[in-house]
Amino acid sequence: MLRLAFAGTRADRARVAITAFGAATAVLILLCAATVLAVQPDSGRYHSRMFSADTLLSNLAFAMILFTVPALFFVGQCARLGAPARDRRLAAFRLAGASPAQVVWVAAAETGVAASAGALLGTVAFLTGRVLLDDPGPDGTRGLPTDVLPATSAIAGIAIGVPLLATALTIGLLRRVAITPFGLVRASQHRRVRAWPGLLGLVGLLGFTALEAASRTEFVQRGRLGTGETWVRMGAILICTVLLVLGLMLGTAWIGHVAARLLLRLTKRPSALIAARRILADPYDVTRTYVVIQVVMTFGGAAMMLHAWLVTDAAVRGAASRETALRYGGTAWDPAGTAAFRSGVFELVNGVLLGLLGLAAFALLVVLVESGVARRRTLAALVAAGTPRAVLARAQCWHVLIPTLPGIALASLAGMLAMRSFTGTATGGWGRDVCDGTATECADPAFRSAHSVWHDVTLVFPVPLPWADVAALAAAALLVVLTVIGASLLLQRSSTNPSELRAD
């Protein structure tokens, strides 16, 4: 089975390598998240304040787990690379006498072994990184928790779980495929694209609002959920996130479908007509192609909104401290240290988002190259019939940008609004004990303790929407998409060669 699974062409070997890379990335991120969960809060062991509080650690671990979602989607998209050649190879196995179940297991073995190799590579990279990055200072503090190792069961579960998930995904993708000795027939139904499935995104947004309202109830604030409150909250956030992403995917398919129909009515340019007909032929192919970028942009919009709240929170606490000092004396709290720490965290988040955009760009490039290979006969026929290659290049641009532009905008806006459910306002309070006697009387500790009155100042600032940050992130995503389009067009000439019309 293993020999048959890897007896392919260069496209098959490239698919194996890319699948291994995606699995290694997912395993590495998950192992880092497991390390964060294993850290015991201690302000004296690490340089960063992120490892000094339970809340910061749990939020950091949950964010890292969410960031593995684009990597897992990337692994799923890698299975599409070289699909036509693999289809012919699997059909040859059926022609040689293999049963449909045996052929499915051959395809699953290819993905499983590739993902297992990637999981092993990610585990080795994690263990090696712990040693290379372990650099304690003279006072014994570290910049990263390299002195903490997750439980052996957690490491084994992650290293085994990712390949199993990738293998199950491959089997699920082949569930609606009939493998025959003469090729593969996909049982797809060309159903009408409707707008209402996109309402799942609205349900997800309303779910975030309901979570915020529930967290303010007396039942939750009194701790009636017990020790499982954190996990219940994270599970609810994950469910709302999945609904939001599904709504964006299905809603973008409908928007692309409507935009393509409108484009057919408004223009007669050949490139636009070709792109519009491709979108109308399979609108849901858009959701499968650009899902990684949509997920990244959703997380990015939420991160920009969270940063705006953190900045406002530091400002309102500083203002409350200054007002308290002005009214009741004493020194005001300086928010410069907190602002600098949060600025450093924001820069780290921006670096992670750019890395995920690079991963999404790589996934998009894989899909576009695979699409060109799968349609090489159609493209070659168009060129042989007299269609200029420049028209086909512009059609590729239209086909990518028609669904991508609204998808990026909607995903960024949805992520920002979802986070705003929790961060609409920032409340800061500051208090001080004030003795109501004379200076001589207040100098007596006994008198002071009996006549001290607590005064506090509480301020509420509205959090502004981070339109500039979200626009900058959307512009970066659009630049990445345009770069990927340019790279895919460089490979299009070989796919448009009329020699592709010859029989294999």
Image: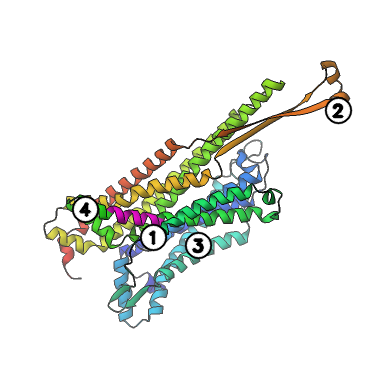
Question: Is 387 placed left or right of 282 in the picture?
Answer: left
Residue of label 1: 77
Residue 105, how many percent across, how many down? Answer: 42, 74
Q: Position of residue 164 (x, y in %)?
A: 50, 67
Nearest-to-viewer mark from 3 and 4: 4
**Label 3: element kind:** helix
Q: Which residue is mark 3?
A: 162
Q: CA distance from mark 3 to mark 4?
A: 46 Å
Indicate left or right for 446 with 54 as reference.
right
Query: Whole-Å distance between the Cαs marked 1 and 3?
Result: 15 Å
Q: Nearer the viewer, mark 2 or mark 3?
A: 2
Sort mark 3 into few (<14), some (14-19) or many (20+) by Cα contacts within 10 Å. Answer: many
Residue position marked by numbered label 4 in the rendering: 265
Residue range highlighted in magenta: 249-259
Q: Residue at x 39, y 42 (%)?
A: 474
Q: Is residue 184 above or below residue 257?
A: below
Relative placement, left or right, of 95 versus 198 is left
- On the image, the x and y values in percent for residue 402 come to 30, 50
The numbered dot on residue 450 is 2
Instruction: Please identify the residue farthest to the left as the structure is shown.
Output: 386
Q: Which comes before the other along the chain, label 3 or label 4?
A: 3
Residue 320 is inside the magenta segment: no
Q: Earlier in the sequence, mark 1 or mark 3?
A: 1
